[in-house]
Image (cartoon, grey):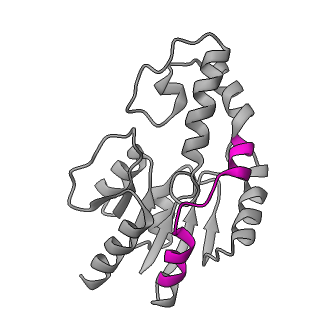
């Protein structure tokens, strides 16, 4: 199988950085706190305007991408799946906000020893990327993207964050860790 993989919130635990920095940033700017607990994106969960969000992103984006830990057992599971004949294509929006994200990501993957068949950066349309790459299953954490992909026939492993809402679709499997990713892919590859 060809497995598409997102980076933030799937391979790297950047969401913990983003959430913590968002709370501190909101306090420092006399914000009122979180207003939408089920939103992954800080600008919606804190109801910030564009200027506030831009300042927030500028303060934490690159730092989080440099420092965020690899999700537990992600590398080991990727290596096992590759040894079983599967291949991985990185499909990420990284690079859209800041081109430096691309080099940071390449360096992080190299230093962690994670080898992907191909990496597509600056992807604002992950559906097109999945179709072009003939992805069998996409591992993604962003609700709206999973919704769009699954509505267009792409099987998704929804790496569900603690704050996001659930899915009830036949071609969406919710996973919370890389052990569950492995189990889901083994099951999908048997079908």
The quarter of the picture where the N terminus appears is: bottom left
Residue 95 visible in the shown view:
no
- Where residue 189 appears, as percent x and y from the top left, is 32, 82
Q: Is 83 rendered above or below residue 62? A: below
- Where residue 103 appears, as percent x and y from the top left, is 78, 59
The quarter holding residue 114 reads: bottom right
- Where residue 138 appears, as percent x and y from the top left, is 42, 64
Residue shown at 48% from the left, 68% from the top = 4
The quarter of the picture where the C terminus appears is: bottom left
Q: Is 131 rendered above or below residue 143? A: below
Q: Is residue 80 left or right of residue 25?
A: left
Residue 25 magenta? no
Residue shown at 40% from the left, 24% from the top = 36
The quarter holding residue 144 reads: top left
- Where residue 165 appears, as percent x and y from the top left, is 32, 40
Furthest toward the bottom, the residue is 84
Image mark count? 0
- Helix, strand or loop for the magenta stretch, by majority: helix
Residue shown at 52% from the left, 11% from the top = 32
Residue 74 visible in the shown view:
yes
Residue shown at 62% from the left, 74% from the top = 118
Q: Nearer the viewer, residue 51 or 36?
A: 36
Q: Is residue 86 left or right of residue 189?
A: right
The quarter holding residue 134 reads: bottom left
Read off the magenta span: 61-80
Q: Nearer the viewer, residue 9 or 68?
A: 68
Residue 64 magenta? yes
């Amino acid at each position: 199988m060809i497995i598409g993989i997102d980076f933030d919130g799937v391979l790297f635990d950047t969401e913990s950085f983003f959430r913590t920095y968002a709370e501190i940033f909101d306090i420092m700017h006399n914000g009122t706190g979180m207003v939408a607990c089920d939103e992954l994106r800080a600008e919606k969960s804190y109801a910030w305007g564009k200027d506030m969000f831009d300042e927030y992103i500028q303060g934490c984006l690159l730092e989080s991408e440099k420092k965020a830990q690899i999700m537990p057992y992600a590398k080991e599971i990727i290596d096992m799946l590759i040894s079983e004949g599967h291949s991985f294509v990185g499909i990420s929006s990284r690079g859209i906000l800041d081109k430096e994200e691309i080099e940071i990501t390449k360096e992080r993957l190299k230093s962690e020893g994670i080898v992907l068949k191909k990496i597509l950066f600056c992807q604002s349309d992950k559906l097109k990327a999945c179709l072009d790459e003939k992805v069998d299953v996409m591992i993604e954490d962003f609700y709206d993207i999973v919704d769009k992909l699954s509505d267009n026939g792409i099987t998704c492993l929804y790496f569900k964050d603690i704050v996001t809402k659930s899915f009830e679709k036949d071609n969406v499997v919710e996973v919370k860790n890389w052990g569950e990713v492995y189990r889901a892919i083994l099951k999908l590859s048997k079908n």
